[in-house]
Amino acid sequence: MDYLEEEIKKKLKYNLQEQEIIKKMNIKPEIFLPLIFSLKFGGNWSYKTEKDNVRLMAIKDKVTKYDPQEKVGYTMETIYLFSNPVVIREEGGVLRLEKCSEKQEREIVERPYIVEVDADDIIKAVLHPGKLKIKVEHITGSLTLEGSLAYGVSHEMDHLMGQDEEHPKFLWDFNYELL
Ligand SMILES: [Zn+2]
């Protein structure tokens, strides 16, 4: 078997696995899409299904376990997938410059430091690059996220709810200062 053939077989097997896990989790295939995007391309994703008007959002967390003595480690990725998410609590305000793939330039936004999100369904996926495993489970109850995860939720919720900053500030609103 040549290398290319082996690659194709692996990809087919992987795709089959994806379909199987979707079936086992008892969800519609399109629900899984933002999670697949986050796994394949990285980052956070959100989108609305046209047919059933389901709002979906995948938020990614990365944690590196590191041994400073040996200088080795691995980066675990946790992705939270929300169906019809609702923000039920927000705390704090963090000013930051953000770049959105839909926009040309970065702009200043204020994000909460903590968000509590509820949803019709929350799925947690944990990817371990050493074990080559992606563990997936349904989560019950709401989820409280902080820091970069809260910024991510707020950013994607703006997309899902069609909210845009009224008077956005950009890089050219900054002033240089020579010290
Ligand atoms: Zn965006």
Image: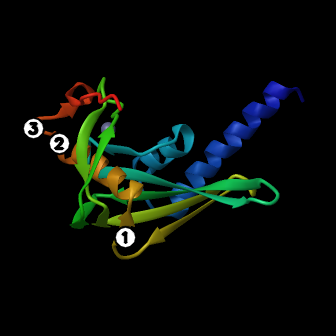
103 relative to 77, above or below: above
Residue type at mark 2 is: Gly
* Residue at (74, 39) in percent of width and height: 10
Q: Could you say where residue 78 lies in the image, as x and y percent from the top left? A: 53, 58
**Mark 2 secondary-structure assignment:** loop
Which residue carries the number 2 mark? Answer: 162
Q: Quadrant of residue 2?
A: top right
Q: CA distance from mark 3 to mark 1?
A: 29 Å
- Which residue is more in the foreground, 19 or 40? 40
Which residue carries the number 3 mark? Answer: 166
Residue type at mark 1 is: Leu
Q: Could you say where residue 92 lies in the image, as x and y percent from the top left? A: 24, 63
Q: Could you say where residue 62 lies in the image, as x and y percent from the top left? A: 55, 54
* Residue at (75, 58) in percent of width and height: 131
- Which residue is more in the foreground, 7 or 98? 98
Task: Give the mark nearest the N terminus, 3 or 1.
Answer: 1
